[in-house]
């Protein structure tokens, strides 16, 4: 999926959206209109879903999914990500590369758009990582 393939109506709906962010000591509500104007975003295929994050395309090769969760009705996608774009030492990835994105599916669309995009310390809790349900 590409932004260029979206109708002007859908692009207008995206421009009207806001999102919450905390990145590198900056925080606040952001506007998707500013993201579209200044960051040159594009859809990413993450765990089989088309997702629009408030980042530039040049970061895409540096992003991997650590884990994800989809709501039962498929309206909400939570992504725990690793973005190594600005990490200078691999030993610092746990502290500098983690991101969490809470993404919502746009009404009438098959893609997800971030409404929350925050830094996240990459932590793994062994007892919580099983995807199998107990008997």
Image (spheres, grey):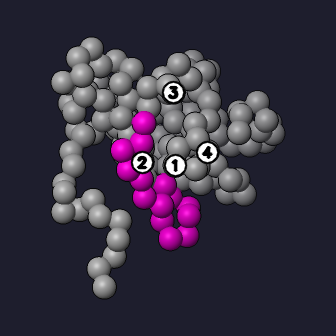
Q: The magenta stretch spans which residues?
A: 64-77
Q: Which residue is the site of mark 1?
A: 47
In-image side of 132 versus 25 (left or right)? right
The residue labelled by disc 4 is 50
Which percent across, then down, holds residue 59? 48, 23
Residue 60, disc: 3
User: Given contact means CB atoms under 8 Å apart, are the residues at marks 3 and 1 in contact?
Assistant: no
Q: Which residue is mark 2?
A: 79
Residue 131 in magenta?
no
Quarter assignment of residue 80: top left
Q: Secondary structure at mark 4?
A: strand
How much space separates mark 3 and mark 1, taking CA atoms? 14 Å
Q: Residues within 10 Å of mark 1 (few under 14, many from 20)?
A: few
Circles 2, 1 touching at the beta carbon (< 8 Å): yes
- Label 1 sits on a secondary structure element that is loop
Bin the neighbour count of mark 2 within 10 Å (Cα to Cα): few under 14, some 14-19, many 20 and up.
many
| Quadrant (top left, top right, bottom left, bottom right) of the N terminus | top right
Magenta span has 68?
yes
Image coordinates of residue 130 in percent, x first then y, are 29, 64
Select label 2 or label 1 by which is in front.
1
Which residue is painted at 42% across and 42% down in the image?
65
Q: Earlier in the sequence, mark 4 or mark 2?
A: 4
- Majority secondary structure in the magenta region: strand
- Residue 124 is tagged as none
Q: CA distance from mark 2 to mark 1?
A: 9 Å
Badge 3 element: helix
């Amino acid at each position: 999926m590409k932004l260029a393939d979206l109708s002007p109506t859908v692009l207008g709906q995206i421009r009207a959206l806001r999102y919450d962010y905390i990145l590198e000591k900056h925080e606040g509500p952001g506007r998707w209109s500013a993201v579209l104007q200044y960051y040159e975003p594009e859809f990413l295929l993450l765990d089989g879903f088309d997702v629009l994050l408030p980042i530039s395309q040049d970061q895409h090769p540096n992003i991997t999914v650590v884990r994800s969760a989809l709501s039962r009705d498929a309206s909400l996608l939570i992504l725990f990500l690793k973005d190594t774009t600005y990490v200078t030492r691999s030993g610092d990835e746990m502290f500098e590369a983690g991101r969490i994105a809470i993404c919502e599916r746009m009404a009438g669309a098959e893609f997800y758009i971030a409404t929350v995009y925050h830094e996240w310390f990459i932590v793994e809790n062994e007892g919580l990582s099983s995807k199998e349900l107990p008997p």
